[in-house]
Image: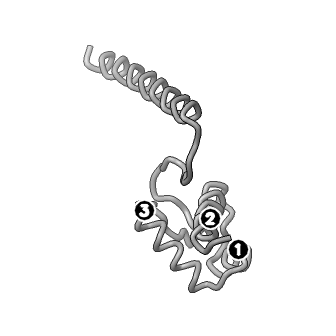
Amino acid sequence: MSAFIKRVELINRIDQLIRLQATGTPVELASRLGISKNKLYRILKNMRDLNAPIDYDVTSRNFVYQEDVVYFRFGFYPTKLYRNTQVSAYKKLSLNSTKKIRELTKEIH
């Protein structure tokens, strides 16, 4: 397996652990992933370069996203899957927007 694919898989795994709030400390996370702490910090920098709003929360002792993000996805996927994802996201956005407009309209009147 190429180093590039391994890096992408590590990014995907870190993303999953962040979402599960199960990263632990940097030392624990590096150990769980079987990499050095320095390599972990390089990967986190790569993720930040890709606009992942990652921060470390000292209270929970976990890496966290500072804001909601769409999940990390890298690769080639069938058009049908992509279109279904787009339609689903659009419907959700449209539904939320409609609800928000109704709420704002009620507040005005």
Residue under circle 1?
33
Residue under circle 3?
50
Asked whether the residues under the numbered discs 2 and 1 touch, taking CB atoms below 8 Å apart as contact, a structural biologist would say yes
Amino acid of disc 3: Leu
The numbered mark, 2 or 1, whose residue comes first in the sequence reads 2
Asked whether the residues under the numbered discs 1 and 3 touch, taking CB atoms below 8 Å apart as contact, a structural biologist would say no
Along the viewing direction, whichever of 30 and 107 lies nearer the viewer:
30
Question: How far apart are labels 3 and 2 at the CA level?
Answer: 14 Å
Q: Residues within 10 Å of mark 1 (few under 14, many from 20)?
A: some
The numbered mark, 1 or 3, whose residue comes first in the sequence reads 1
Amino acid of disc 2: Ile
The numbered mark, 3 or 2, whose residue comes first in the sequence reads 2
Percent from the top left, x then y, of residue 72?
54, 53
Residue under circle 2?
14
Label 2 SS: helix
Mark seen at residue 42 = none
Label 3 SS: loop
Name the residue at the left extreme: 108
Q: Residues within 10 Å of mark 2 (few under 14, many from 20)?
A: many
Residue drawn at 64 percent across, 70 percent down:
6
Name the residue at the top extreme: 109
Percent from the top left, x then y, of residue 31?
72, 79
Amino acid of disc 1: Leu
Residue drawn at 57 percent across, 70 percent down:
4
Picture quadrant where residue 24 is located: bottom right
Along the viewing direction, whichever of 60 and 32 lies nearer the viewer:
32
